Amino acid sequence: MKYEAIVLAAGQGKRMNAGMNKQFLELGGEPLIVRTLKVFDGDERCAGIVLVVNPAERQRLAQLLERYRIRKVTALANGGQERQHSVYNGLQALKGEGIVLIHDGARPFIRVRQLHELADAAVQDGAAIPAVRVKDTIKKANGLFVEETIDRSSLWAAQTPQAFRLSLIMEAHEAAKRDGYLGTDDASLIERLGKPVRLLEGDYQNIKLTTPDDLLFAEAILASRLVE
Ligand code: CTP
Ligand code: MG
């Protein structure tokens, strides 16, 4: 079964501290956002991509799509203040049927195999997300003093893309909007309705480029894939 994708590029990349939206930073000679889009563009099961952009960068992104011959972007939607608003705007560009994968433009290392696993799981269970087991010991703190150590055995770090039946995620976004709820991922909007979200084992290499250190990790992942 095919799916549609929403790829988010409308952030500011403040934590990357690059003086520009991190989506345009080059990784191995190609802009980050191009690398991410290419994975979806090259997947035969991807029916179309809605790219969510900052209106001031629309032109620049449209030029990149031309230059790198990315064919499946069917719409450029305007981003909003928070990530959730950007997703909401992206959803408006889709019909309420089928499966949607919602992905951070800043995660270029997603594998096609995982896209398929997620889409299949969403058909079955309505909502599915990739996540990795937390490796560090996690402390809950009050200021700079530890309050408690959280049991790690049930903790997972959520990634994207997160896959949903379109009707379900649209309903969840409408409900969040109505209630003034702001979440840091899309699955949390489903969880608050008491509906199940399935976890799939993710990939530690599917990092989100967030801070300057992540550029070093990204170069290493890229180098390892060149010899695959
Ligand atoms: N994003 C978006 N619209 C927003 C905020 C974020 O489309 N209003 C996108 C970003 O472009 C990114 C993804 O959501 O691909 C994940 O967000 P994050 O890593 O936080 O990126 P930024 O918001 O750009 O970075 P920062 O928070 O450091 O400013
Ligand atoms: Mg952000």
Image: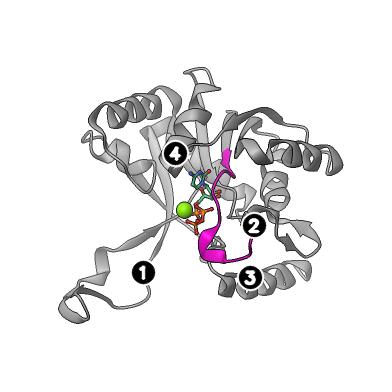
List the residue tagged with mark 2: 20
Residue 69: where, in percent of width, then height? 84, 39
Q: Which amino acid, mark 2? A: Met
- Mark 3 and mark 2 in contact? Answer it, CB < 8 Å: no
Q: Which numbered disc, 4 or 3, marks the residue that appears first in the sequence?
A: 4
* CA–CA distance in space, label 3 to label 1: 21 Å
For mark 4, does the 10 Å Cα neighbourhood hold few (<14), some (14 to 19), or many (20 or more) residues?
many
Q: Which numbered disc, 1 or 2, marks the residue that appears first in the sequence?
A: 2
Apparent side of residue 221 relative to residue 123 in the rendered image (left or right) = right
Q: Which numbered disc, 4 or 2, marks the residue that appears first in the sequence?
A: 2
Q: Which numbered disc, 3 or 2, marks the residue that appears first in the sequence?
A: 2
Residue 110: where, in percent of width, then height? 60, 54
* CA–CA distance in space, label 4 to label 2: 36 Å
Looking at the picture, tell me which residue is in the foreground, 13 or 185.
13
* CA–CA distance in space, label 1 to label 2: 31 Å
From the viewer's perspective, is the residue at label 3 or at label 1 nearer? Answer: 3
From the viewer's perspective, is the residue at label 4 or at label 2 nearer? Answer: 2
